[in-house]
Amino acid sequence: MGEKKLGFGFKVGYSIGYVGMSTLLYIMFFMFFMYFMTDIVGISPIFAGTVSLIAVLWDGISDPVVGYLSDKSKSKRGRRRPFMLTGSMIAAVSIVLLFTKVDFGSALQNAYYLVMAMVFWTALTMFDIPYNAFIAELTDSQSERTTIRSYIMFLAAAAVALVLGLLNTSIEYFTELTSLPEKGWQITVAIIAVFGFILASISWRVSRGREKAFESEIPTENPLVMIKDIFLTKPFKYLVSSSLLIGVINSMLIGMLIYYYTYYLQFDGNQISLMFSIAASAGVLWPVLIAFTCKRLNNDYRVYMITVAISGLSFLLFPIILGVKTMAGVLVFVIVAQLCSAISLWIFGFTFAYENAELDAFLTGKDRTGGFVAYVSFAIKLGTAVGMWVIGLVLEMSGYIPGAAEQPVEVLNSIRNLVSLYPFTLYIIVFILLLLYPLKQKQYNTLKDLIAKKESGQEYSIDLLDKKLVS
């Protein structure tokens, strides 16, 4: 396979599939599902958060299973692409059903949303895990992998800016047309789901014939054994732990924005749409800046640490120390905060997962890329679900009144803390975990040299690797 360069057209075509499924549908769930449940359906915040948590805990089962099945698949159509197509179809349908208001009575209604959430996350996993694992097969080049993930985040930010900019207008239009707020949401989500599926289909089409056969052993062990073996790769423990915590932070940011804008800052609908659109548009710049910085420094690990530090400090500086409440000030805060929690993680989390899979393959001779990708993905989603559950719990305990224009002071303080003190505290832990991460750039460069010597039949010494990586 080698240090293969990927063409511009292919990078764009492949990237938009992630935009359609793992960005737009993901954002709709984590940014608006809680609000839809509390303010449109009328379900309590704690139950809405619990639905998200249970669904993603279920996703913890499906993630490694899909990763394992796609690793060992011998389909003539490729081991990744059949999963991608099927998953994108089911995900598009299930998210529409998830944003559909039903009235079956309390127990059946709760069961409906729980089942739909589980179906949605299983389907998204069927697309997401094989898609991300596929990138490791396209090229061995770290810079090319980082570049394609930068393409993904650039296009994702552009798509999110477009969708969020039109979201409120669409909801209001269809609400007025049908005289039902829930129909406004349902039709808008259906349009986004169709758009997402079209993008995923383009990605599926352009990747045709790109999958390669591996000389590494295809895993045949029990998935539970594979899970245990994967976590014997020591750097992976730090990567998964930090990814989970950033997932929590990310949830507190994107899940609370609509509450933060609506109740704490008292912005109206047009202001909220403008805030979403400008912040997402500005997010287009971060992948470009990250890719440029990585190229200049030639050190992905160092760039990731810088983004973590900047993003973490923003949660303390803007809402607490400066106490910003103007649209301009809040926009700066959201744009800076998303540097790591909403963008950098999605670039480096998976890039580092590929590197851990390379280390594992070098030491064991087994290709388990799907498993490594699955657990980084699951860690992020689990963290995000935990964050949503915490949001529901805190809002419930502070006395949140769904749909009320005026909220108690305790609720307003809780909303502020959920986008400031809680994320900042978690970032301190993330920074420490990344400082302890053993597969830093120098060690990864050594690993690549050893892999090259092994593949070419030259003599090599595993002693060149840090003992923390091989013991």
Image (tube, rainbow, N blue to C red):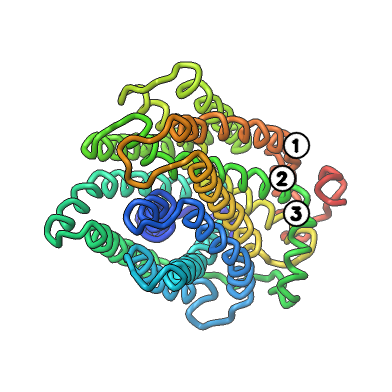
Q: Position of residue 95 (x, y in %)?
A: 37, 65
Q: Which residue is mark 2?
A: 238
For the residues carrying marks 2 and 3, which lies nearer the camera in this image?
A: 2
Residue ID at (41%, 56%): 29
* Relative depth, front residue between 5 and 427: 427
Q: Are marks 3 and 1 in contact (CB under 8 Å)?
A: no
> Which numbered disc flags the more N-terminal residue, 2 or 3?
2
Q: Secondary structure at mark 3?
A: helix
Q: Is residue 381 above or below residue 436?
A: below
Q: Is residue 365 above or below residue 320?
A: below
- Picture disc at residue 145: none
Q: Position of residue 382 (x, y in %)?
A: 58, 54
Quadrant in which the N terminus is drawn:
bottom right
Residue ID at (83%, 52%): 460
Residue ID at (43%, 42%): 400
Q: Are marks 1 and 2 in contact (CB under 8 Å)?
A: yes
- Please state which amino acid type lies under the numbered disc 3: Lys
Q: Label 2 crowding class (10 Å Cα cut-off): few <14, some 14-19, many 20+? A: many
Q: Label 1 crowding class (10 Å Cα cut-off): few <14, some 14-19, many 20+? A: few
